Amino acid sequence: MSEAALLPRSPLAGLLRPVGGRGAAGVTVAERGSLRIAGLVARAGGAVLADIVRAAYGVDLPTSPRRTEADGLEFIWAGPAQWIVLAEPGADDLAATLRGRFGMLAAVTEQDDARVVLRIAGPRVRDALAKGVPIDLHPRAFGPGDVALTLAGHVPVHLWQVDDGPAYDIAVARSLAGSFCHWLRDSAGEYGMAVEG
Amino acid sequence: MRIPCPHCGERGFQEFAYYGDAGPKRPAHGGDTGEDVWFDYVYLRDNPAGPHEELWYHAAGCRTWLVVTRNTLTHEVAGARPARDVALERSAAP
């Protein structure tokens, strides 16, 4: 019998395709694959958790829809007293590390394969997103570091602005990544969409 | 109609799910609580024309319950508070 090998496979395999070929792409998209992701929910209140996180990483856990970075980790607001924490691929088991440090003060859940995170940028990215995201992404209303839990073409998304490029990261539940990509290709098609990475 | 979510900011009502009147208070279990009290709690609702406190769930946002004050005649939303805060206040009241 031959040995079966289990290979990791992106939920976007075969779905993330460029659209339109003429001229420079108005929208570029890249999967931030193989991230380490953990959910963090403070038990009763969260003031002590905030103190411990500040002592450990030197940052304040955002108490409004914002994102902060420290020590190679991204702390992203995900609701009252809730956050998701991201670490680059290859990092140690993030959920286990966080549980070891904050397990008494917060519920930590490993989310590595639960979400797909896409980085979407380009000169027409706001126009493409505006077709399905019901919040205002104009710079006067939403800037780098801002976070929102909202919709994109009826798919619940967690999005945050990375820089003034503008570039956005959009996290989608793995099982809805196909629907999201379908919507994104339709929305970005008229501006041309390039796939990186 | 736009709802000022205390956590997310102002959002369209499409992100929310409506539950109903935020007023009814669950009667105590057993003891003297009569059938008529339960009937009132489970089935009977006022139908006010004007400001109304009601429960909305921010399903496509922060996933918390809110008590929204909405004018049923004009859909004007006067405010929204976390339902948790309202419940804590109520349970603290004598």
Image (spheres, rainbow, N blue to C red):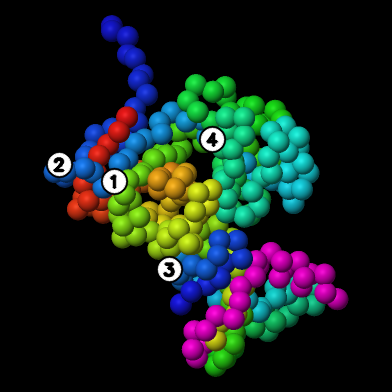
Q: Which residue occupies the extreme right position in the image? A: B94
Estimate the spatial distance between the alpha carbons at disc 2 and disc 1, rounded to whole Å.
12 Å
Image disc number at residue A86:
4
Residue A53: image location, x then y, percent: 71, 37
Q: How many residues crowd around disc 3 within 10 Å: few (fewer than 14), some, or many (20 or more)?
A: some
A26 relative to B85, above or below? above
Any mark on residue A52, and which? Answer: none
Disc nearest the viewer among 3 and 4: 4
Return the residue at label 2: A21
- SS label for mark 4: strand
Q: Chain of mark 2?
A: A
The answer to whether marks 4 and 2 sit on the same chain is yes
N-terminal of the pair, mark 4 or mark 1, is 1
Q: Is residue A159 above or below residue B33?
A: above
Considering the numbered disc 3 on the image, is that residue within a helix, a strand or a loop? helix
The answer to whether residue B34 shows anywhere in this view is yes
Residue A27: mark: 1
